Image (cartoon, rainbow, N blue to C red):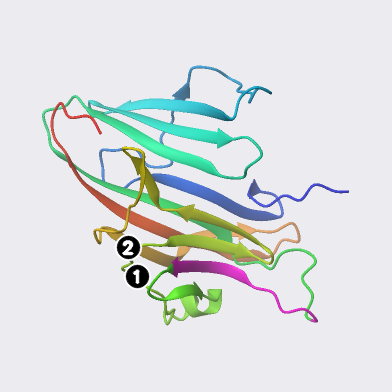
Amino acid sequence: KVPFTLLQDGGEHLYIARTGFLGDVLPSHRQIFTSAKTAYTLGAAQNTLEVRLDTEVSGVKVAKIFVFHKDSYLIDVRYELQNQSAVTLPIQAYYSLIRDGAAPSGTSSMVHTFTGPAVYTTEKKFQKVEFSHIDKNDAEYNRSPKDGWVAMVQHYFVSAWLLKSKQANQTVDLCASGQCTFELKKLDDAMRGADGKTFPVYSAAALINFGALKPQETK
């Protein structure tokens, strides 16, 4: 059996997950973070493994924390922010899945499958969007959700940002207060495949407004 690769940065496809903050102060996905260790292992007696990455920009300490679960593909991602500056900062985060528009290897014209972005909300249910509709700027989907998730689908596999937060032992939907925007778009980037062909690159993202971070405040 040959292991199946879904997310990859380069090679046959570009298919990655990104998260960061919008604006000029808080870090984007391009920011360099540091970790306490160079390698992490989920031990046999452990159910979860936490990996903390730290950085500091303009007087704001930022931690990006990943929690891996035993026997699960679910990965929790959260931020911790400590504003040591004298300026109140708006907090708007993005959670995106980036993929090129090329068909996966092994695609057959005899079998109907889908590759592209999708969103789910209680109001509109599951909505798939063809890359071609993004190209023509006529994609139809719920852009201002009250709940749900954003995803990238590749045949029988799906990667998704599940927009939930654990607060006081309760799971809270981050979009419940209307602070979310779903955004499916074509990026300026392009990917060159192994055969030399160039393919467009697309983003399926959730933008979330977390309000403001006051001086000396921690969130």
Taking 156 as reference, is 139 left or right?
A: left
Residue at the far front in the pictured view: 169
Foreground residue among 144 and 49:
49
Q: What residue did someone put label 1 on?
A: 143
Marked residue nearer the N-terminal end (2 or 1):
1
The residue lying furthest to the top in this view is 36
Residue pictured at 60% horizontal, 67% vertical? 101
**Is residue 213 shown above or below 111?**
above
Residue at horizontal 24%, vertical 58%? Answer: 177
Q: Secondary structure at mark 1?
A: loop
The crowding category of the residue bearing disc 1, from other C-alpha atoms within 10 Å (few below 14, some 14 to 19, many at least 20), is some
Q: Quadrant of residue 116?
A: bottom right
Residue 135 drawn at (x, y percent): 49, 76
Q: Position of residue 49 (x, y in %)?
A: 55, 28
Instruction: Tell me which residue sits at (13%, 35%) in the image.
Output: 214
Relative to 191, 179 lies left or right: left
Above or below, 18 against 130 in this view is: above
Near-viewer residue (57 or 127): 127
* Label 2 crowd (10 A; few <14 / some 14-19 / many >=20): some
Q: Amino acid at mark 2?
A: Thr
Of 119 and 203, which appears nearest the observer?
Answer: 119
- Magenta stretch: give its range: 110-120
The answer to whether residue 13 is above or below residue 68 is: below
Instruction: Tell me the amino acid under the disc marked 1.
Output: Arg
Q: Is residue 138 magenta?
A: no
Q: Secondary structure at mark 2?
A: strand
Q: Circle 2 sits on which residue?
A: 181
The x and y percentages for residue 180 are 30, 59
